[in-house]
Amino acid sequence: MLGILDAPVQAWLNLPIAASTTLLVVFGLVAGAIANFVITTLCWEPRPISPWVKIADWPLDEDQQKVAASLPPRRFLDRVPVLGWLRLSRESELFGRGFWIRPLLIELSLVFAFLWMHEAWLTGYLFPESTAAGTIAACRPWMALVFFFHAILLTLMTAATFIDFDERTIPDVITIPGTIFGIVLASITPYVFIPGELPAAVAPVTFQHPLALSPWWMTGGGLAIGLLIWTTWCFALADRRVILRHGWTKAFEYFMARLTRHSSWKVLAAIWATGVIGVIAVHQIGGTHWLGMLSSLIGLAVGGGIIWAVRLVGSWAMQMEAMGFGDVTLMAMVGSFIGWQGSIIAFFLAPLAAIVIVLVRYIITRDHQTPFGPYLCAGTALTVLWWDRVYNQSFRITIAIMGSTLFWFSAMMLVLLGVMLWAMRWFKQRFLYN
C-alpha cells in the first residue's frame, strides 16, 4: 500500500508499546525544541533566549552586559528540552520574568499531542464511525504514516503561529521547505492524505475525491496543470511589483530589476528548475505517484489561492493590505499536506477558531490585535480533528452535488466580499471621517 515506505512503517508498528511510547516522547520533545529554535532565531527580530545561541554574540546594552556577565554560562543540560527551560529561568532578570514558560509549554504540548494523535489515528479516529474494525486494522500502516505526516505539519504550524503572534509575519523559512516536503512525500505515496468515505471502501482523499477521476489528469494536460501550479508558486515567492506610473516599458524594467535585485532569486530559480524536473519525472512514472503529487500541488494551489484571492480583493476594496502574504504561503503549505478539500474547510473554520484565540490572547496579553495566521493553523487543526463530521458527512456530499458549480459559487462569493468591503469603506469615508 505505502510503496517504499511500507518497510519502515511496518518496523515502527512492530515495536513494543514501551519502545514506541518512549520514541514518541523523544519525537515530541525534539519537535518542540526545533519549533522553539525557529521561533526564537529564524524570525525577523531574533531573541537570544534559545539555549542554542550564545548571549555574548548578541548586541546588548551596558546594563544587559552587566547582567549577562553575572549569570553562569550555558551548559549542555540547558539544551535538554523542558529541563533546559527550567534551568534557564535563572536568566529572567535579563529576558523578563516568565520568558521560559511559553517555550517549555510548547515542548510539553507537542509531546502530549503526539502521544494522543498516535493512539487516535491508529485506532480509527479519522475514519467514519461505521468503518469496520477489520478495515481499521488493515489500515494501521497507512494511518501510522498519516500520523507522522500530521505531526510534522503540526510542528511547522506551531512555529508559524508563535512567530506570527510575536511579529505579525510568517517567515518563508518555514513555509517553503514545508511545502516542498509535503509535495515530495505525496509523490512517494498518496496515502499521506486523510481518509475519506467511498461507497465500497476507505481511501485517501486525493484531488479527484469524491468526483470521478478523468483520464485527462494522467496525460500531458495534467502535467501542464502541475507545472503551471509549481511555476506560479515559485513566481509568487519572488520579489515582484509592477509600477505603471512611467509606462509599460519602464514598468518592465523596474519589474525585472526588482525581481533580480537580491541574490536570493538564484536560489528560487534553482528551486523552480529542480521542481520542474521533479514534476516531469514523477509524471513519467505515473500511477499513484503522479496522483499523489498532483493532489498535493492542487492542494497548494487552492489553499494558497483562496488567501491570495481574498488578499487581492480585500486590499483593492479597502485600499490597504487586507492580509499578509505569509498567510498565503502558510495555506499553500497546509494545502500540500491535506489537499484542496481540507484547505477549503480550514479556511471556513478559521473564524470559528478565531473567537477562542482572540479571547484567550486578550486575557493573557490584553492585546486585541491577533494576526490571521494562528486562525488558519487552528482551522487546519479543527479540520483534521473533525474530519469525519465536516468532510465525510457534509462537505463531501456538497462537492458531489455541486460539482464544477462549486468554483463559480466561490467566485461569486469573492465578488460579493469585495463589494461589501468597498461599500463599508465608502460609508466610513462619506459619513464617519467627514
Image: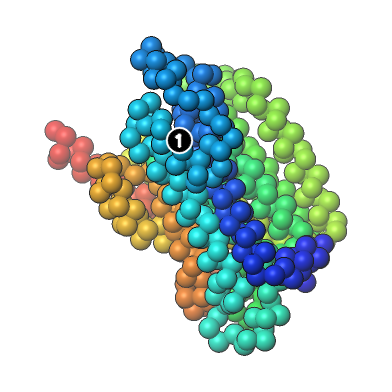
Q: Position of residue 210 (x, y in %)?
A: 61, 74
At a point 55% along the width and 72% down the height, the residue shown is: 120
Residue 202 showing in the rendered view: yes
- Tell whether 237 sits left or right of 98: right
Characterize the local packing of mark 1: few (<14), some (14-19) or many (20 or more) Cα atoms within 10 angstroms.
some
Residue that mark 1 sits on: 88
Residue occupying image coordinates x 67% and y 81%? 137
Q: Position of residue 290 (x, y in %)?
A: 77, 60
Amino acid carrying label 1: it is Leu
| Relative height, residue 145 to residue 47 (above, below) | below
**Along the line of sight, which residue is nearer the eye, 151 or 273?**
151
Question: Is 1 rendered above or below residue 280?
Answer: below
The residue depicted at 30 percent of the width and 52 percent of the height is 360
Query: Which one is in front, 121 or 191?
Result: 121
Q: Quadrant of residue 207?
A: bottom right
Residue 38 in picture, x, y percent from top left: 54, 38
In screen coordinates, is 340 left or right of 413? right
Locate residue 378, reporting x and y percent: 44, 56
Q: Is residue 73 above or below residue 380?
A: above
Q: In the rendered view, does 181 fall on the left or right side of 277?
A: left
Residue found at x 16% / y 34%:
433
Q: Is residue 222 above or below residue 63?
A: below
The kind of secondary structure element at disc 1 is helix
Quadrant housing the N terminus:
bottom right
Looking at the picture, tell me which residue is in the foreground, 406 or 184.
184
Q: Where the C terminus falls, by quadrant?
A: top left
* Label tally: 1
Residue at the top extreme, as displayed: 62
Applied colour scheme: rainbow
Residue 163 versus residue 66: which sits nearer the camera?
66
To which quarter of the image does residue 165 belong? top left
